[in-house]
Image (cartoon, rainbow, N blue to C red):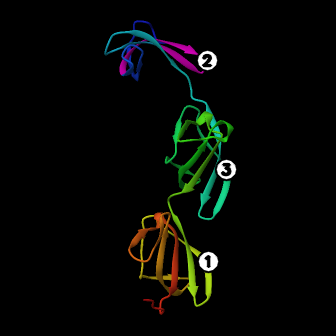
């Protein structure tokens, strides 16, 4: 325990008088279980108050992780009071993921919640993109897919090699529809439509 007449400076904390973050001078430290109470003085307004420091509890969140067409259920760990939002990126099992949905009580979706209130979470892998393909030759169409960097750009009319064979990109399909011209990044694509490279169309 630190003597009462010894002072030091704490990290910034919320001052109840300033209603915001401010630097504090620590006047006394008192152990409280696994944490401690700090008697601290706000260096902006001078008010003296107690700051309770307690170790954060970890929680486990059930997560559905989608990697291309494959989805698996796993558990991710977070601090109980950590606020998680749709669109947040996190690392798990050496891969990067983006949160796409958060459910709280009664399976209601939320844009953001503290980790301790999250019932389930969904995320998609973001360090690689899986682009679905439809390869059409005559009357036959075959579905396939390729993996690539999310920022790789594909353009209508360009040649793409798949399984050792050359195909021409006929159309690109995004969430907003299909286009027969232009370019799109892999992360924007729902599907690409390919014809044999030797085939031409009007």
Is 128 above or below relative to 136?
above
Query: Residue 120 — which label?
Result: none
**Residue sitting at 53 percent across and 87 percent down?**
165
Q: Which residue is mark 1?
A: 143
Observer-nearest of 158 and 152:
158
Looking at this view, name the residue that lies furthest to the left.
Answer: 44
Is 111 above or below relative to 69?
above
Q: Position of residue 70 (x, y in %)?
A: 64, 62
Mark 1 vs mark 2, CA separation in Å:
60 Å
Q: Position of residue 202 (x, y in %)?
A: 42, 89
Q: Nearer the viewer, mark 2 or mark 3?
A: 3
SS at mark 1?
Answer: strand
Query: Residue 74 — which label?
Result: 3
Query: Residue 33 — which label?
Result: 2
Q: Which residues are magenta?
A: 22-38
Residue 192 painted magenta: no
Q: Nearer the viewer, mark 1 or mark 2?
A: 1
């Amino acid at each position: 325990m630190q003597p009462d007449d010894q002072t030091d400076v704490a990290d910034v904390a919320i001052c109840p008088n300033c209603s915001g973050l401010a630097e504090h001078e620590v006047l006394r430290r008192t152990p409280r279980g696994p944490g401690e109470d700090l008697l601290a003085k706000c260096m902006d307004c001078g008010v003296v108050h107690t700051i309770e420091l307690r170790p954060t509890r970890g929680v486990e969140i059930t997560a559905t992780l989608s990697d291309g067409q494959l989805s698996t259920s796993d558990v991710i760990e977070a601090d109980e009071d950590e606020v998680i939002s749709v669109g947040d990126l996190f690392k798990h099992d050496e891969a990067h993921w983006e949160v796409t949905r958060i459910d709280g009580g009664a399976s209601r979706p939320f844009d953001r919640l503290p980790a301790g209130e999250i019932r389930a979470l969904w995320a998609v892998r973001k360090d690689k993109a899986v682009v679905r393909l439809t390869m059409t030759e005559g009357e036959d169409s075959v579905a396939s897919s390729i993996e690539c960097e999310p920022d790789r750009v594909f353009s209508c009319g360009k040649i793409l090699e798949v399984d050792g064979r050359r195909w021409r990109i006929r159309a690109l399909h995004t969430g907003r529809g299909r286009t027969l011209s232009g370019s799109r990044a892999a992360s924007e694509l729902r599907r690409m439509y390919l014809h044999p490279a030797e085939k031409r169309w009007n």
